[in-house]
């Protein structure tokens, strides 16, 4: 073989070997990118362009129903998509304080339940936030003292805790009571069932001391009560069509969305990839979430609490928008909320763009999208 032909062959081999790397760098299934655009999903290490904000402040609860945030932050799956933009995580213990931070400009994106999302949107007359993705479904149970309560009818006359007046679980329990034909004053919690609004941190001690007879609570509080001798009388998923209902949304400041849509899109790429990783690696994800909880509180969950709690939670990109509308209707029926105008509460444009690029089905805003 001549020197010229040998050199040509070597060049062909080099190009062939490099081609898979070039195709991989495109990301999100794109076969080619326009010359001026950065590849979807490219990281700074892959030569992706810097995004429009130097940092993004992300809020969440140290709670298993916020598994997407816990695992995404712990494993670096969210920050990996941000091309050098730093994640500044902020932990909250209650929805109202997270909404206040979002509305006050000290938070950009938050993981939060449907009731605070609705309340925050209504109070600002639709001007301060948007729901941009789902995060989790399920993870709520009615746990009772089996010595005092053996059937659902036995709840009448008993003291049952919920986390907070008007919160997601409180509204669901009040609606369940109403459907039983019983009455409870939504403000005081007094009636055929005594609804005792109790912080989730306090609920296990109140249960052990006998000051409450049960609780309608999210995980891991529900499994903690079971470990203390309680019995699951009802799993809220059994009350919903398809056994799915929104327990955690992802929300964003409208100002941040308008000014830094590229950062929001990158965060959503990270959450979609996180949910995919959680569903593909449930045991690793469970351990990761527990490690993040330990970093937050200095204490990890015992297996007897962690295992059943984790099994009852479904991470999902779908915001399950129709179930948020139902929960809003329940709050109105309980007279904890005036009938709201929720038109525009969702903006799923960027999420659906990310899902489509990843070869996943798009999701619906149930007619409540921004016009």
Image: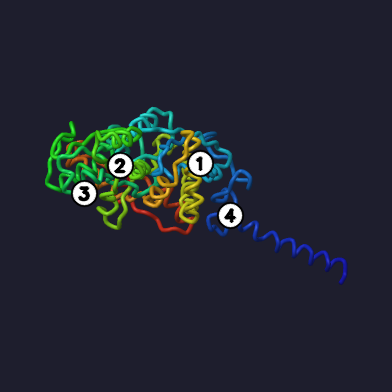
Tag 4 or tag 2, which sits nearer the N-term?
A: 4
Callout 2 touching callout 3 (CB < 8 Å): no
In this picture, residue 333 sits left or right of residue 25:
left
Q: In the displayed orientation, state which residue is furthest to the bottom.
A: 1
| Label 1 crowd (10 A; few <14 / some 14-19 / many >=20) | some
**CA distance separating discs 4 and 3:** 58 Å
Tag 4 or tag 1, which sits nearer the N-term?
A: 4
From the top left corner, tell me how far across and down residue 51 is, in percent. 54, 39
Looking at the rendered structure, which numbered label has been put on residue 150? 3
**CA distance separating discs 1 and 2:** 23 Å
From the top left corner, tell me how far across and down residue 319 is, in percent. 35, 49
Secondary structure at badge 3 equals: loop
Tag 2 or tag 1, which sits nearer the N-term?
A: 2
- Between disc 1 and disc 4, the foreground one is 1
Q: Which of 175 and 252 is in front in this view?
A: 175
Looking at the rendered structure, which numbered label has been put on residue 217? 2
Secondary structure at badge 1 equals: helix
Looking at the rendered structure, which numbered label has been put on residue 26? 4
- Between disc 4 and disc 3, the foreground one is 3
Tag 3 or tag 1, which sits nearer the N-term?
A: 3
Secondary structure at badge 4 equals: helix
């Amino acid at each position: 073989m001549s020197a010229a032909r040998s050199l040509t062959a070597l060049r062909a081999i080099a190009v062939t070997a490099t081609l898979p790397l070039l195709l991989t760098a495109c990301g999100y299934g794109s076969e080619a990118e326009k010359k001026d655009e950065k590849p979807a999903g490219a990281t700074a290490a892959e030569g992706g362009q810097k995004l429009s904000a130097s940092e993004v402040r992300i809020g969440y609860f140290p709670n298993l129903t916020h598994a997407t945030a816990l695992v995404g932050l712990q494993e670096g799956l969210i920050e990996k998509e941000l091309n050098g933009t730093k994640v500044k995580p902020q932990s909250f213990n209650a929805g109202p304080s997270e909404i206040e931070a979002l509305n006050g400009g000290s938070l950009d994106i938050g993981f939060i339940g449907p009731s605070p999302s609705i309340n925050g949107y209504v109070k600002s007359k639709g001007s301060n936030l948007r729901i941009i993705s789902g995060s989790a479904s399920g993870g709520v149970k009615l746990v009772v003292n089996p010595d005092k309560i053996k059937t659902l009818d036995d709840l009448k006359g008993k003291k049952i805790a919920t986390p907070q007046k008007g919160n997601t679980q409180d509204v669901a329990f009040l609606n369940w009571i109403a459907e039983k034909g019983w009455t409870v004053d939504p403000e005081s919690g007094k009636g055929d069932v005594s609804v005792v609004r109790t912080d989730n941190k306090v609920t296990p001690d109140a249960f052990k001391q006998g000051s409450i007879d049960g609780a309608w609570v999210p995980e891991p509080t529900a499994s903690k009560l079971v470990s203390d001798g309680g019995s699951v009388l009802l799993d809220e998923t059994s009350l919903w069509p398809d056994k799915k209902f929104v327990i955690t949304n992802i929300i964003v400041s409208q100002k941040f969305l308008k000014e830094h849509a590229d950062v929001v899109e990158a965060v959503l790429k990270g959450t979609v990839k996180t949910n995919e990783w959680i569903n593909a690696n449930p045991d690793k994800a469970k351990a990761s979430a527990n490690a993040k909880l330990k970093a937050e509180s200095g204490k990890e969950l015992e297996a007897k609490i962690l295992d059943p709690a984790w099994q009852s939670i479904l991470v999902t990109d779908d915001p399950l928008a129709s179930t948020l509308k139902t929960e809003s209707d329940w709050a109105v029926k309980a007279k904890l909320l005036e009938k709201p105008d929720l038109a525009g509460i969702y903006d799923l444009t960027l999420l659906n763009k990310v899902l489509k690029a990843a070869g996943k089905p798009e999701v619906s805003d149930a007619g409540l999208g921004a016009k």
